Image: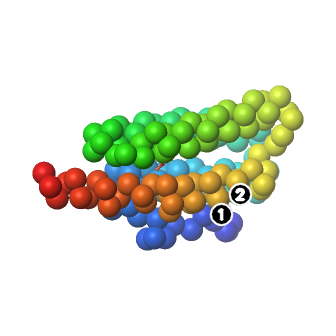
Amino acid sequence: IFMELIQWADKYLTGFKEIDNQHKGLVILINELFTLMQQGKAKKHLGEIFDHLTDYTKKHFFEEEKMMVKYAYKEYTQHKEEHKKFIEQLAKFKTEFAQNKITISIEMLNFLKQWLLNHILVTDMKYVPHIKQVEINY
Ligand code: FEO
């Protein structure tokens, strides 16, 4: 039995079901990469899960950005910029990984973990009161 890299906690809940499910999905994929890495699984397998993580992240960001636009969230631009930078970082990891310059390491996984949890707790949580307020006024 391997330990999970990220333990989900209620403090990560935004209260928006779809968003929360997507965040949980991202946690599951990062944990899966961690488990595969510990088991010393083949590069090909890790590469596939990494691609899946990238696709799923893009899908989540797209959905979240759509929601922010819908509710005319004023910090949309900065938020979107954070998303963009993270996708660029994932692409960079992917290239280096494909060129055998790096391996999927604990340092990389810790970066993904720290980025995701910090983004949820700080950046995502900022839109929560705004969207709830708009919903009340409907
Ligand atoms: Fe849930 Fe801004 O990512």
Residue 87's image quarter? top right
Q: Is residue 49 above or below residue 15?
A: above
Amino acid at circle 1: Leu
Q: Position of residue 99 (x, y in %)?
A: 83, 28
* Of the pair 89 and 50, the residue shown nearer to us: 89
Q: Tell me the distance, in whole angstroms, between the alpha carbons under discs 1 and 2.
A: 8 Å
Q: Position of residue 34 (x, y in %)?
A: 69, 55
Q: Position of residue 79 (x, y in %)?
A: 48, 45
Secondary element at image label 1 = loop
Number of marks = 2
Would you say residue 44 is visible in this rendering?
A: no
Amino acid at circle 2: Asn
User: What's the residue at 34%, 50% (across, down)?
Assistant: 18
Confirm or deny contact between disc 1 and disc 2 (CB under 8 A).
yes
Q: Is residue 21 above or below residue 5?
A: above
Residue 43's image quarter? top right
Sequence-first tag of 1 and 2: 1
Which residue is disc 1 drawn over?
Answer: 5
In this view, the residue farthest toward the bottom is 10
Which residue is disc 2 drawn over?
Answer: 110
Q: Is residue 11 left or right of residue 18?
A: right
Q: Is residue 27 left or right of residue 59?
A: right
Q: Is residue 132 left or right of residue 110?
A: left
User: What's the residue at 19%, 54% (across, down)?
Assistant: 135
* Of the pair 81 and 5, the residue shown nearer to us: 81
In this view, the residue farthest toward the right is 101
Q: Position of residue 67 (x, y in %)?
A: 33, 42
